[in-house]
Amino acid sequence: MNMNETILESIDPEVADRLIKSGDEIAQGRTKSSWVGAALAMGSVPIALAALSKDAFGQASTSVQGVLNFALMLEIFENEFYKAVLGASSVTAQNTAFAAVRAKVSPAAQAAIAQIQLHEKAHVDTLTAAGAVNTLKLDGTSFDFTGARGAGNGPFAQATTDLNFLLLTAQGAEDTGVRAYKGQAANLMSSPATLEAALRIHSVEARHASKIRRLRRQTGAPSNVRYSGVVSGAGSTAIGADNVSSPAAGAVTALTAIYAGEDNTTQGTVAVTGLSNLPTSNFGTNAPSEAFDEPLTMAAVIAIVQPFFIPSLS
């Protein structure tokens, strides 16, 4: 029996029926097997269940266009961040800001970051082709990567000189993206093609998060920064900042918000307790919470990223 079957069969049948019926209605005639199968193939069981459960239990929704615009905003931010780190920004001041830390990045890490940046650019292009609109006219001049909305002296300024903090910041950005896409999956279910594109991007963002963690482990990050990209714990515990020297209080607050609720073991109304009976030598005692990436609402994401955007996002 594969892992998908194990997790699906652990769900209470009555709850599963509600999820699948809701998914069928939103999918406008698509069978539960075709929709859920596509979601599982692109975003794994947790994505499918979270998307279905958000509608089944009556949570608020956002229009498809609104989700596209929101996703594009985040991808432009990530693309411009990595361009600045690499010295490839169209804004000279952005390149100069990261010059000191750039010299500390190994050639292998630079190659990895360059590949991630290309992915982010592709995400921008994909979302734009899908109909997303850059409503704020964002470009390289729209961001303050120190987190001070243009003042240039925010709590993430340490990322311009400290390699460990830079990688920690990149990890936080990727994990925010993963949780943001998860949070909006349900709002795209009326547009299967758009949902497919979003889930594909979601899976790439998760791979980025895993790669950044590997780079962090190479520079001394603690073992709770998992190679797999799995989030262990919640809030400050999940950050894994033991190899970062004296991060600013504002940065700790922001990073804590990124990982808030990641210790959750309930999906929809189902308590994921079965995994706790597995041998801890193979899966660990935190397996029930680590099995799922928790969604972030649009409002929560905006609150996290607003300090890096000079224009107002509200």
Image (tube, grey):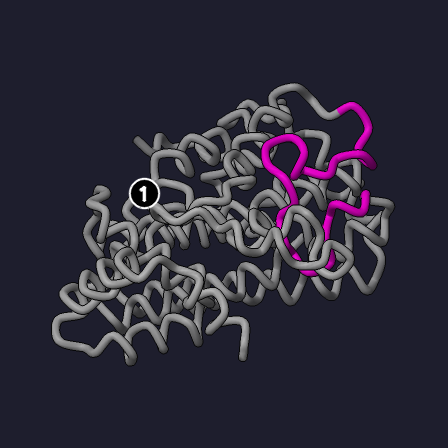
* Residue nearest the observer in this picture, 239 or 304: 239
* Residue position marked by numbered label 1 in the rendering: 136
Q: Residue at x 50, y 69 (%)?
A: 6
Residue 245 occupies quadrant = top right
Q: Which residues are magenta?
A: 222-246
Quarter of the picture containing the N terminus is: bottom right
Quarter of the picture containing the C terminus is: top left
Is residue 286 rendered to the left or right of residue 313? right
Residue 252: x percent and y percent? 64, 26
Residue 119: x percent and y percent? 54, 66
The amino acid marked with disc number 1 is Leu
Residue 101 visible: yes
Is residue 89 rendered to the left or right of residue 300? right
> On screen, 300 above or below 7?
above
Q: Residue at x 35, y 57 (%)?
A: 12
> On screen, 154 above or below 183?
above
Q: Residue at x 54, y 71 (%)?
A: 3
